[in-house]
Image (cartoon, rainbow, N blue to C red):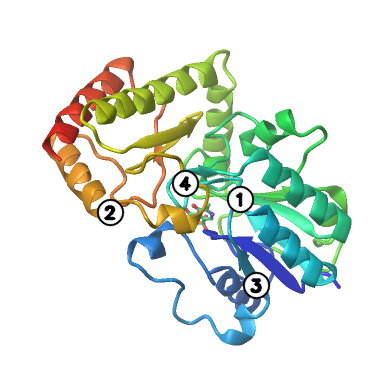
Amino acid sequence: MLFTWVFAFIPIRITARFISTRSTSQLILATLLVKAGSGLATFGNPTSAGVPPEVVQHTMVLPFNDIEALETAFKAYGNDVACLMMEPVAGNMNFVRSSVPFMKRCRELCTAYGAILAFDEVMCGFRVALGSAQSLYAKEIPGFEPDMTVMGKVIGGGMPLAAFGGKRDVMSHLAPLGAVYQAGTLSGNPVATACGLATLREIQKPGFFDNLNLRTRSLIAGMTAAANDAGIPFCGDSEGGMFGFFFMPTLPQNYATVMTTDADRFNRFFHHMLDEGVYFAPALFEAGFVSAAHSEQDIAETVAAAKRAFAAL
Ligand SMILES: Cc1ncc(COP(=O)(O)O)c(C=O)c1O
């Protein structure tokens, strides 16, 4: 049966635009808020109030990058799974990319059991690459494609807009071809759509992503070197303009490990950087972003400020 179980990898949040009526939308939104993103994590709330158990029972939350847990879940419930939904490069637990073997297994199991593999690219879409995160996995896994993709404000160049898309057999369930009706006040809003198109034109220019990658990597490399010099356990990762860093020696692979980060040290670092005029995301569960407007000098000044901050920690 379609739309029975929804598997979700934490942290996950999603727009409620899959379905039609307001009450149903809220139901599905609530389902996926069983375990939500960085905002809730920051305040230490495992889930949102107002999510009734009758709704939660249709969602199973699995640990990220854990092939064994994934296989066990599919073995037990595979025939009832409607959808496996994930942020391929998770930005709601700082920055944690799905490993290639894990992603490959997600695809294989969804195909084998007839479940939809849905990518939430609300945050990583167009930020990690022109073809979004799915294009990175397609380079590593021959023929790789998710069945559905969800995008938020990024598709409006930062303006209020959202869209989802997918393979023909999935999308043909939508009205007027199918029975699933979708509408929204800002759907296809012309101003936001024009902004989105203008952004796409900019980021398609030759060398755009090479330059962005370079600057983001140099930020992470510079901060890592500065932390090492100060003897502070630190690591970071980036793709395109999206990055994350952790006060721990090796990159975490899942939410549970992210939660073991030295939060007190992060807070002191954050405030020191703020005093220096550098505003990182104010919680260690948030990803960071380098934009085309950030110059080499901005990066160098940030690294220099981080050096002073590490020395003071
Ligand atoms: C990964 C992810 N998915 C979904 C959402 C929700 O998007 P929207 O605010 O358009 O509903 C967010 C919000 O930032 C997000 O980060």
Indicate which disc, 1 or 3, sits on the residue closer to the N terminus: 3
Under mark 1, the amino acid is: Asn
Callout 4: CB less than 8 Å from ligand 1 = no
> SS for tag 4?
loop
Mark number displayed over residue 8: none
* 218 vs 54, nearest the viewer: 218
- The answer to whether one can see residue 223 in this image is yes
Label 2 Cα crowd, 10 Å radius (few <14 / some 14-19 / many 20+) = some
Mark number displayed over residue 263: 2
* 178 vs 132, nearest the viewer: 132
Q: Which residue is mark 4?
A: 252
Label 1 Cα crowd, 10 Å radius (few <14 / some 14-19 / many 20+) = many
Label 4 Cα crowd, 10 Å radius (few <14 / some 14-19 / many 20+) = many
- The answer to whether one can see residue 19 in this image is no
Alpha carbon of mark 1 to alpha carbon of mark 2: how far? 23 Å
Under mark 3, the amino acid is: Thr
Residue drawn where x is 86% and y is 73% of the image: 1
Alpha carbon of mark 3 to alpha carbon of mark 4: how far? 24 Å
Callout 2: CB less than 8 Å from ligand 1 = no
Contact between marks 2 and 4 (CB within 8 A): the answer is no
Mark number displayed over residue 65: 1
Residue drawn where x is 34% and y is 51% of the image: 261
Give residue 39's position: percent from left, percent from top.
Answer: 39, 60
Which quadrant of the structure image shows residue 8?
A: bottom right
Indicate which disc, 2 or 4, sits on the residue closer to the N terminus: 4
Under mark 4, the amino acid is: Pro
